[in-house]
Amino acid sequence: MTAAQCCETSDTMSNTAVVRGLVLRQAEYKESSRMLTVLTDGMGKIPVSARGAGRRGSRTAAASQLFAFSEMTLSQSRDRWYLNDANTIELFRGLTEDIAAFALGAYFLDLMDAVCQEGVDEPEILSLGLRALWLLSEGKKERALIKCSFELRLMSLLGYRPELERCAGCAAEDIDAPVLDLRGGELYCAACAEKHALSPRKLCGGSLSAMRYIVLAQDGKEFSFSLKDAPLKRLGATSEAYVREQLERSFASLAYYKGIEG
């Protein structure tokens, strides 16, 4: 069973819980312990203390790594969750063998961490993240394609899906020179964009078709398309700019990835 298929509702009871979760952040503290930020299926994003995880031979060492997706046995004390035991499901080892893939994966984790609120269950975002990390780790798709698909699908899940069916100004569906308004998330023809778009980004026929597919595809199918060369580059720049505009922030992990890719 792949990681993308392993999202199931958590089983919680009193002060203990068994959940499946993805490690979004990891920080060392004290001599051999780690503080984790984990996106779980059932309890949403939660902080978890992994005591002794840094010791040699620790049974929770693998599950407390960045990118690790595991079944975790947790206990709660004084409003804090502690990692008691874990069985790893997927470690995405391919990400540790390619620095560019690792950097892009770290950007995906940062995005999920940024948009998920603590304690709010986000099973669709977790599933999307697992699918993207698996494709990235396995080298199943071009990195640029995985990146733009993840960005646009994530924005759609958050309620920021761009309106791409027709021109928001004149209602034309067949647009020769499409323009996306990054701020409003609306599509315009070139003439209407001059009047209405506050933050215009030029598209092309190929990049627009791919965007429409990504935001409307069934869950699990959002990466199942092909795009190359200039249209893919244009789509990647647009999806990245759209995330930055909608979230009103940038990410150091993205800058690092772009520095590696050149």
Image (spheres, rainbow, N blue to C red):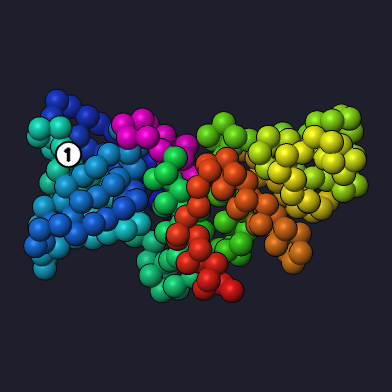
* Residue 20, x across and y down, in percent: 30, 42
Residue corresponding to mark 1: 81
Residue 228 appears left or right of 261: right
Question: Badge 1 local density, few (<14 within 10 Å), some, or many (20+)?
Answer: many
Please name the residue shown 45% across and 73% down the image: 98
Q: Amino acid type of disc 1?
A: Trp
Residue 58 appears left or right of 12: left
Please indicate, yes or no, whether residue 212 appears anywhere in the rendered image: no
What's the magenta region? 116-131
In depth, the one of 258 and 158 nearer the eye is 258
* Residue 87, x across and y down, in percent: 23, 52
Count of all numbered marks drawn on residues in the image = 1
| Residue 128 among those drawn in magenta | yes
Element assignment for label 1: strand
Q: Establish if 119 lies above or below 22.
A: above
Please name the residue shown 45% across and 59% down the image: 252
Which quarter of the figure has residue 66? bottom left
Residue 60 appears left or right of 20: left
In depth, the one of 186 and 196 nearer the eye is 196
Q: Establish if 170 lies above or below 71.
A: above
Please name the residue shown 56% across and 72% down the image: 261
Farthest residue to the top: give it.
14
In depth, the one of 1 and 171 nearer the eye is 171
Which quarter of the figure has residue 88? bottom left
Please indicate, yes or no, whether residue 240 appears anywhere in the rendered image: yes
* Residue 92, x across and y down, in percent: 39, 61
Please name the residue shown 18% across and 55% down the image: 34
Residue 208 appears left or right of 159: right
| Residue 148 among those drawn in magenta | no
* Residue 219, x across and y down, in percent: 57, 39
